[in-house]
Image (cartoon, coloured by chain):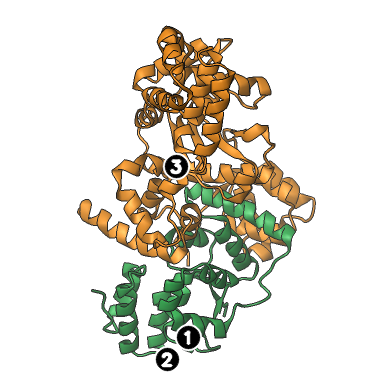
Amino acid sequence: MAKRIICDTCSAIKLAYFGNTLFTANTLKSGDLILHQCVFTEIKKWHPTKKGKYKKEIETLEKIRATPGLRVDRKKELAQEVIIRKTRDDLNLSVGKGDITQLVAILLHDLHLVTNDNPFKNLAEAMEVAVFEAELIAFEGIEHKVLTSKQVQDAVDYWEANEEKQASKAVKSKLAKHGVKYK
Amino acid sequence: MPKQSMMIRVNSKALRESIIKRQSLASLETPLGVSRQAINGWLSKNRIPPRKLSILASELDFSVDEMEAITTSPKDEAFVLFRTNRNVAVSQGVKEDVLEVAEDFFSLDDLTAINRESIDIVLKNEDPTSAAKSILKQLNLSYDNISLDKVLTALKRYNVHILFYNFGEKFVDAKAQAVCVRRGNKRVIFVNSYEFVEDVLWRIFHEVCHLFSNHTDVTEEDEKFCNEVANQILTPDAFFQENKSILKRRFSQGLRLTPFLVEEIATELSSSFQGVVIALKNNKIIDDTVSRYLWGVIRNQKKTKKRVHQIISPSDEIDPKEFLDNLLEDSDRAKFVHLQQSVKMGLILDKISTRRAAELLHIDEMSIQQLARRWKSQYGKKNNL
């Protein structure tokens, strides 16, 4: 099963709410979760107040660390970037250099993607990459009995209180089957 | 998994050549997971799923040049013209950054685009004074009613947008003051947000002159011409000649009073202090002594004069998320945040990735996601969604 890479801080912080449970190898049947280095680079830029607010989650992520060996041959990377940029322009999406570089790594290493960012998700899907929302992973956690509905409900309440991006309607309705509700 | 396989347009001839150079079409059936007929079908329709092209590029080791040739479709060429301090050369990397932000803006601006007129004025062999008159006439402005708001509104009608943007150190290193980008009938003028607020109109008119002159590459002559046109719009010789005797009398009343007089004229003409001093000297209203004194005043003013970034960028003490949210609600500062407004709309309509938005708005991605959620809910309530 292909590994699923987290490239944005929002998804990483959300899933780190549960400690390293979801990041432990062979826990999730749809593929292990791994972290891209960019998550840590982005967190470094945060305001100290925010770092304090998410201290627990950041500590969890630091223990898990970024997955090494995601670098790709520069010539191949540049050629792939041309295709992705062309696809992005055809879809009329504004997706930046950082996302494009990560998408190249995803394509060349045959990975799946975890993101809640719709334009990036649309671009990745156009490139036939499987995309998962962070909340969908939490849903899998309940299904595989590594998380309880109560834990996920607490997490959803916490994410909502922090004004974090919400899950899509489809994922919300999946979670509702386990009694997890949004306000 | 994808709902349907999207296709991108390709140059089949270039793609076929790149494949045949290395392998037969039949040998690609396995890596692509399709039949030779399907591959031929893509080639005959000039369209291919991007993932399949990605596999081909990886399997056959296509070079970047080959990929550019394969994916290039006829598109208007984009022109990037820089105005830099002392004509410092601008690196290709900086130009590419500028073009990328402009392309983002063009795609986001399409979201709210209305039918706009195209520029039907081309300045040819005109002297700067009559060129200045032509520009003002076309924009329906006159010397005595110029303001930043009016200029921005007038230019928008012609698909010319003014964006205030901090391109970071690379842009500052290049001493770039303003840049204009043109692709097809879309035009953007970026003003470096490190510029002084009072210099903004001059920078804009200089770039407008390039656009109205259809410059695709600028020579030193073109630069001088556009400088003079901007001067004649904001500090017209006609004004100084008409009022020469009064001004001469007032400027002879004592050196210490002269800065106040210059300020007064600058406010009346919507010009900068420096622009007025240059015009006064050129029109022989002040002599060398007064001019030297006023240049001293200009040097001192530089420490205290307001720069655009002080209006649109948060200081270290303020939460950048709250600053940005308030900024976009502030009608007084709306003229400086057109790009930011477009990014906000792009986030509401899911047209821009949060990472790209974070890059463009110079704040962290998580804050952008929180703002996007807030904006989406406000937009939904306003539009009863």
Image position, residue A5 (x, y; %): 55, 74
Residue B314 vertical position relative to residue B135 in the rendered view, above or below: below
Q: Pointer 3: what residue? A: B306
Residue B171 vertical position relative to residue A56 in the rendered view, above or below: above
The residue positioned 56% from the left and 46% from the top of the image is B100
Kind of residue indicated by mark 3: Lys
In the picture provided, is B339 more to the left or to the right than A84? left
Chain in orange colour: B
Which type of secondary structure does the marked residue at label 3 adopt? loop
Image position, residue B193 (x, y; %): 49, 43
Q: Are marks 1 and 3 on the same chain?
A: no
Image position, residue B171 (x, y; %): 60, 45
Kindly report which numbered mark, 1 or 3, lies closer to the viewer in this rendering: 3
The residue positioned 31% from the left and 68% from the top of the image is A169
Q: Pointer 1: what residue? A: A22
Q: Are marks 3 and 2 on the same chain?
A: no
Kind of residue indicated by mark 1: Leu
The residue positioned 31% from the left and 42% from the top of the image is B332
For marks 3 and 2, give the CA distance.
57 Å
For marks 1 and 2, give the CA distance.
8 Å
Whether label 1 touches label 2, CB < 8 Å: yes
Which of the 4 image quarters holds residue B35? Answer: bottom right
Q: Pointer 2: what residue? A: A146
Kind of residue indicated by mark 2: Val
Which type of secondary structure does the marked residue at label 1 adopt? helix
Residue B238 vertical position relative to residue B17 in the rendered view, above or below: above
Chain in green colour: A
The residue positioned 63% from the left and 41% from the top of the image is B95
Disc nearer the start of the sequence (1/2): 1
Residue B48 makes an appearance in the image: no
Which type of secondary structure does the marked residue at label 2 adopt? loop
